[in-house]
Structures are given as structure tokens and as C-alpha cells.
Image: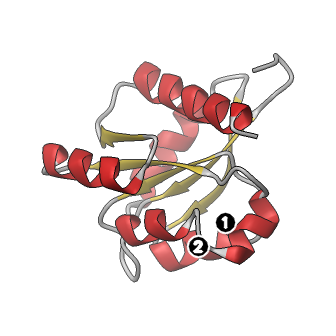
């Protein structure tokens, strides 16, 4: 990843305080930028169809469309592919509970990572950078 390459991040979580905390942490990094936020899966899907995003950080238990359902759709949705181009946006799932279960689900879905919602900021930053780098090298 070049110094000029900024990782564009979408946050999808039902809790405004969670999104705000992640935004503050992510935007504190020179090479990371939150470009969109959604309180549910339907809005996250709509944003991915309009806003270029490198990595989507998605709660597994979103209202209206779960994070798992959203992660399934990202690589297959034609409208997302038009905006995001190839390769598709990388997904990082987050969960407050049953992390081992969601890690198994995440592997099946091919998401980049499954993290606890209380992840240490440095680990989150590292996963976002790694996901974006993989996306760029898949190009």
C-alpha cells in the first residue's frame, strides 16, 4: 500500500455510540477514513451500492438485514460491483457474543476477519489495512 492510498471504511452497527467510537479511532489514523455509516443492513447495502469502500466493518446482528446476510451479498451484488469494481469490498464482521461460532461462519463466507466488538484499536487498524492490501493485490 502506498503512503497516498487511504483505506475507505464503511461502519455498520445498530448502536450510534459504537459507530462513533470506531469512527473516532479509525479517523485518527492518517491512512484510514470512515466514508459511510449505517445503522442496519439494508442501509449498509444501499451505501455499498453508492459509495466506494475498501473495507466494511459489519456487526453480525444488524436489524433489517443481518451482517451475515450482507456479507453474503457483497461479492455477488451487481450494483455493488459497479461501484466497488473488482475485487469486491472486503468485509470484517464484528460480534459481542459467540465469537467462535461467528469465526466459523466468517470462514464459510470468506470474510476477511471476525473480531470482537471490543477489539483493541491497533488490531482493528491492522485488520483494516490488511484487508485493503489484499483487495488491492487481488485486482
Dots 2 and 1: beta carbons under 8 Å? yes
Residue 65, compared with residue 132, is above or below; it is below
Seen as rendered, the residue at the extreme right is 4
**Which residue carries the number 1 mark?**
48
The residue shown at (36%, 77%) is 63
Q: Residue at x 80, y 68 (%)?
A: 82
Q: Residue 23 at x, y = what percent? A: 56, 42
Give the numbered dot on residue 24. Answer: none
Could you say where residue 67 lies in the image, as x and y percent from the top left?
Answer: 39, 65
Q: Residue at x 32, y 47 (%)?
A: 107
Res. 45 mark? 2
Q: What kind of element bears circle 1?
A: helix
Q: Nearer the viewer, residue 15 or 57?
A: 57
| 99 left or right, relative to 52 | left
Task: Relative to 33, say whether 108 is above or below.
Answer: below
Crowd rating for badge 1 (residues with CA inside 10 Å; few <14, some 14–19, many 20+): many
| Quadrant that contains the N terminus | top right
Secondary structure of the residue carrying tag 2 is helix
Horizontal and vertical percent position of residue 14: 39, 66
Say which quarter of the image contains residue 122: top left
The type of colouring in the image is secondary structure
Q: Is residue 64 visible?
A: yes
Residue 18 percent coordinates (x, y): 40, 50
Picture residue at 15% right of the left edge, 43% below the top: 100
Q: Which part of the image, by quadrant, shows the C terminus? A: top right
Count neighbours of disc 2 (C-alpha within 10 A) and say few if under 14, some if 14 to 19, many if 20 or more. Answer: many
Q: Confirm whether residue 27 shows in the render.
A: no
Amino acid at each position: 500500500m502506498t503512503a497516498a492510498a487511504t483505506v475507505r471504511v464503511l461502519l455498520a452497527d445498530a448502536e450510534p455510540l459504537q459507530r462513533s467510537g470506531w469512527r473516532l479511532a479509525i479517523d485518527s489514523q492518517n491512512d484510514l477514513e470512515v466514508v459511510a455509516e449505517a445503522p442496519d443492513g439494508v442501509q449498509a447495502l444501499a451505501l455499498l451500492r453508492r459509495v466506494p469502500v475498501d473495507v466494511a466493518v459489519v456487526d453480525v446482528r444488524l436489524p433489517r438485514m443481518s451482517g451475515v446476510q450482507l456479507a453474503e451479498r457483497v461479492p455477488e451484488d451487481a450494483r455493488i460491483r459497479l461501484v466497488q469494481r473488482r475485487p469486491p469490498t472486503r468485509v470484517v464482521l464484528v460480534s459481542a457474543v459467540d465469537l467462535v461460532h461467528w469465526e466459523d461462519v466468517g470462514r464459510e463466507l470468506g470474510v476477511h476477519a471476525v473480531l470482537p466488538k471490543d477489539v483493541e484499536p491497533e488490531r482493528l487498524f491492522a485488520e483494516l489495512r490488511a484487508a485493503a492490501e489484499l483487495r488491492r493485490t487481488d485486482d
